[in-house]
Image (spheres, grey):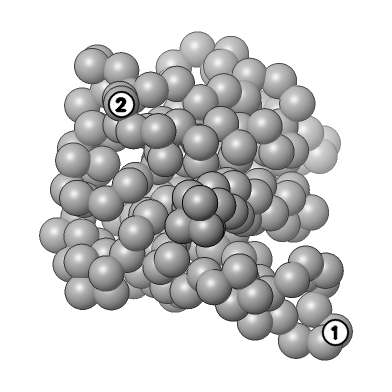
Amino acid sequence: MRVLIDPGHGGDNLGAVANWHADDGFGTPKELREKDITLAVAECLEPLAEPPADSWARVLPLSYWDLNVIFTRLDDQALSLTDRGSRAKDNDADLVIHLHCDTEPTGERNGTRCYYWPGSDAGALVSHTIAKHSPFPFGSNAPALPEHYPRVRNVLSKYPMTGVLVEMGFLSNERDRSWLQNAWVQRQLALAVLQGVLALGKTLEAKAVA
């Protein structure tokens, strides 16, 4: 099974941006950009494909499960939706996982949201597995893609293969924002994505044997 990991945004496309002042006695201005978080989680996933002996990744490499992992970007480059879709098609990807962060005006919503195309059993399996293993303890769920999310629908509609869009957390929520900057949380998000990939891989393998 070929899996394309797509860290959202990049280059001059910053994605969502959170600005706030640190509680350090000086009110130091802080900024967190979606494109940096998505790339950081993708970079955590990269060594899982073939982890070196001293890697933090204490799991079997993805090649053990006959999974080939490809990335749309592992640096700070801008890619259009067309570019991302072409990489998925050119590499004959069976599954595309888009990594993003969310934002909303109240600052109250939190947790991981994993969206999949309505009616996609494979998308539902991957989404629910990722949400289940997300390190965010509250607010994480995996709804079928609602009609009123045109931006997400626009992303998933570009791909003929199974697609899942993971909103890893809310930059507009203070707790989520703090967690998303944490290297341990980023690794746990990567492992949650891995769990979703393996869940689908094992299901497809069981069907092939049957």
User: Foreground: 128 or 22?
Assistant: 128
Q: Is residue 51 above or below residue 6?
A: below
Residue sitting at x 51%, y 41%? 126
Q: Tell me if 19 is positioned left or right of 187 in this view.
A: left
**Could you say where residue 14 lies in the image, as x and y percent from the top left?**
37, 52
User: Foreground: 20 or 15?
Assistant: 15
**Could you say where residue 112 lies in the image, as x and y percent from the top left?**
58, 31
Give the residue type at disc 2.
Answer: Gly
Instruction: Determine the image quadrant of residue 187.
Output: bottom right
Q: Is residue 64 above or below residue 163?
A: below
Q: Which mark is residue 119?
A: 2
Q: Earlier in the sequence, mark 1 or mark 2?
A: 1
**Could you say where residue 117 lies in the image, as x and y percent from the top left?**
30, 31
Residue sitting at x 82%, y 36%? 25
Q: Is residue 119 above or below residue 15?
A: above
Q: Is residue 22 visible?
A: no
Q: Which mark is residue 54?
A: 1
Instruction: Determine the image quadrant of residue 150.
Output: top left
